[in-house]
């Protein structure tokens, strides 16, 4: 259903809309869910711009530097693919996440659960 032939995709049917819509891209879907269920706790929106930035950064690292590498952990590939290099590349991305985590925890952004936590748990 994703016009790019990729995952993820989400069907949306919110009345009064007559037709079902499809949205795609992890961050777009996450932002939609956060907005759609803003009245449900926890809100997944960190309490300060700095904490929101950390959550967004972790989500971006997961989407841009980790997601496309995950298949190298378990799928068979041609012999010319350097699986160890791909896994190392993923490790570098996880190291980048470690460097931006709020040390006050327990969440990515400290005491506030955020989109970064959802993205990290999906990886």
Image: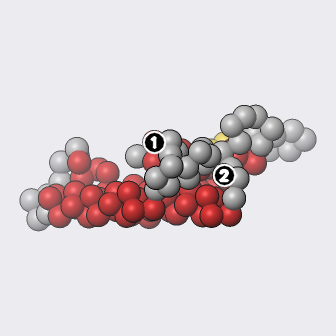
| Residue 12 in sight here | no
Crowdedness near tag 2: few (<14), some (14–19) or many (≥20) residues, C-alpha within 10 Å: many
Q: Is residue 114 left or right of residue 75?
A: right
Crowdedness near tag 1: few (<14), some (14–19) or many (≥20) residues, C-alpha within 10 Å: few
Position of 102 relative to 19 (above/below): below
Res. 46 mark: 2
Of marks 2 and 1, which one's residue comes earlier in the chain? 2
Q: Residue at x 68, y 63 (%)?
A: 49
Position of 71 relative to 65 (above/below): above
42 or 85: nearer the eye? 42
Q: Which mark is in front, 2 or 1? A: 2
Horizontal and vertical percent for residue 109?
A: 56, 52
Q: Secondary structure at mark 1?
A: helix
Position of 37 relative to 48 (above/below): above
Res. 2 mark: none
Q: Secondary structure at mark 2?
A: loop
Which residue was labeled with disc 1? 121
| Residue 43 in sight here | yes
């Amino acid at each position: 259903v994703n016009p790019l032939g990729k995952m993820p995709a989400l069907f949306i049917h919110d009345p009064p809309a007559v037709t079902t819509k499809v949205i795609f891209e992890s961050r777009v879907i996450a932002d939609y869910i956060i907005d759609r269920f803003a009245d449900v706790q926890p809100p997944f929106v960190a309490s300060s711009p700095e904490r929101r930035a950390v959550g967004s950064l972790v989500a971006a690292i997961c989407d841009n530097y980790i997601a496309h590498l995950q298949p190298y952990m378990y799928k068979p590939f041609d012999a010319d693919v350097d699986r160890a290099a791909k896994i190392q590349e993923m490790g570098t991305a996880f190291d980048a996440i470690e460097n931006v985590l709020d040390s006050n925890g327990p969440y990515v952004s400290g005491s506030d659960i955020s989109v970064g936590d959802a993205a990290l748990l999906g990886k």
